[in-house]
Image (cartoon, rainbow, N blue to C red):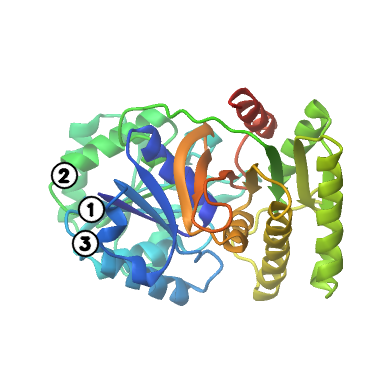
Amino acid sequence: MIAIIADDLTGANDTGVQYKKNGYSTTVKIMNDNDVSSSMFKTSDVVVINTDTRPLSKKDAYDCVFKLAEKLNSVNNLEYIYKKVDSLMRGNPAPELEAILDSTDAEIAIVASAFPDNGRIVTDGTLLMPDNKHVDITNIFNTETKRKAVNVRLINVREGAESLKQYMEGQMENGADIFVFDTVSNEDLATISDAAMLIGKKKIFCGSAGLAKQLGRKKKAEQKYDGTVFIVVGSRNAATAHQVRMATETFKLPVVLVNSEEIIDGRYEKAVSESVEKAKEYYLNGNKVVIIAIDSLFEEYTVVLRATATENAKSLKVAESLGDIVKRLYEHIKPVTFVATGGDTAFQICNFLGSDGMELVDEIVPGVPIGILREGMADGSSMVTKSGGFGDEDTLVKVINYLMVNRK
């Protein structure tokens, strides 16, 4: 049994699906304190719990994860906890990892946040951001926790698992308990995983989907999809804008633009109802794939590691509107496969549909999993989730092709 703690829903899914591909039965749960017990694992080898703590303050995120990890620590036969962190280090990676270490009997943390399949690499303890900014990961863990974090250089990783294990044991003798690894390839992540397993101490794994990918052998899942595809875009990331453009040009897709200004200014019902009617019109005209996107998608936007409370409130309102639009559409149109871009968007779709999680099925492209919604009005419907910054320009094209090829 393995537990994964993630701070948003797309991250929960793109990490959990790595285990599913490795042959583990995997379920994603939206956090509910009452459900944290051994019973969570009755039908799944891996349970991924989305705490939705990315926008919280450091203290609130710490408190939430501490309580969750404390309960998980009492689950019998739990092999380890995997702390999923954002590959761009957004949110509260250090306080949340420290919360797990404080609330469990784990002695060390293995931090490998790189995701080479999506161009995220770490060298000299530093992450290179898409906009050419740098994030010193080792410094984050040293300054935002009370523990000693050390950077493990690529030269040490490349010496192999046994040598790396000995190097880490030497660092432990000098007081290190958080290891931040340089990583530029999947092979590096595999070596880190192998070395960690050789160390006879209880450990917390901490990374993005890249490290999870190395935890078993690939086992392809099979599933067929039918009905209408609604691609719901709540992310304003430039990568997503390029992906939407290519998808619309490739397949001549209709796009419903949701008026975010009306939603924020109090004309919520007008914006939502107009978007629902426009999407229904496209569906009735025979369109099998419809894109629903916020109208600010194509505006200039840069990556923000921590938004202000006002910005978070506005983003939440827009995300809620997208979930509401999906719910109203589902009352009239089914079967449906949903494609959600952005963690808040995916969360609100599940929230409005009354779903308590997803049973993961497959990974379409790196970082883009597909699963089956469980519970709620859309129980059994398929859903694809994608973080806003993930993927190449043709990622949505590949998602649509996958869904079309795998039709019943």
Q: Which mark is residue 75?
A: 3
Q: Is residue 115 visible?
A: yes
Q: Is residue 155 visible?
A: no
- What residue type is disc 3 on? Val
Q: Which mark is residue 163?
A: none
Task: Kindly identify the residue that appears in the image at 64 percent across and 59 percent down.
Answer: 304
Q: Are marks 2 and 1 in contact (CB under 8 Å)?
A: yes
Task: Kindly identify the residue that appears in the image at 43 percent across and 52 percent down.
Answer: 28
- Mark 3–mark 2 distance (CA, rounded to whole Å): 22 Å
Q: Are marks 3 and 1 in contact (CB under 8 Å)?
A: no
Nearer the observer: mark 3 or 1; the answer is: 3
Q: Quadrant of residue 253?
A: top right
- Mark 2–mark 1 distance (CA, rounded to whole Å): 9 Å
Q: Position of residue 164 (x, y in %)?
A: 23, 37
- What residue type is disc 1 on? Lys
Position of 254 compared to 54: left or right? Answer: right
Q: Position of residue 204 (x, y in %)?
A: 28, 54
Reading the image, the residue beneath label 2 is 199
Mark 1 crowdedness (10 Å alpha carbons): few <14, some 14-19, many ≥20 = many
In front: 239, or 302? Answer: 239
Q: Quadrant of residue 254?
A: top right
| First-in-chain label (3 vs 1) | 3
Q: Name the element at disc 3.
A: loop
In this picture, is 383 found above or below 305?
above
Q: Quadrant of the C terminus?
A: top right
Mark 2 crowdedness (10 Å alpha carbons): few <14, some 14-19, many ≥20 = some
Reading the image, the residue beneath label 1 is 203
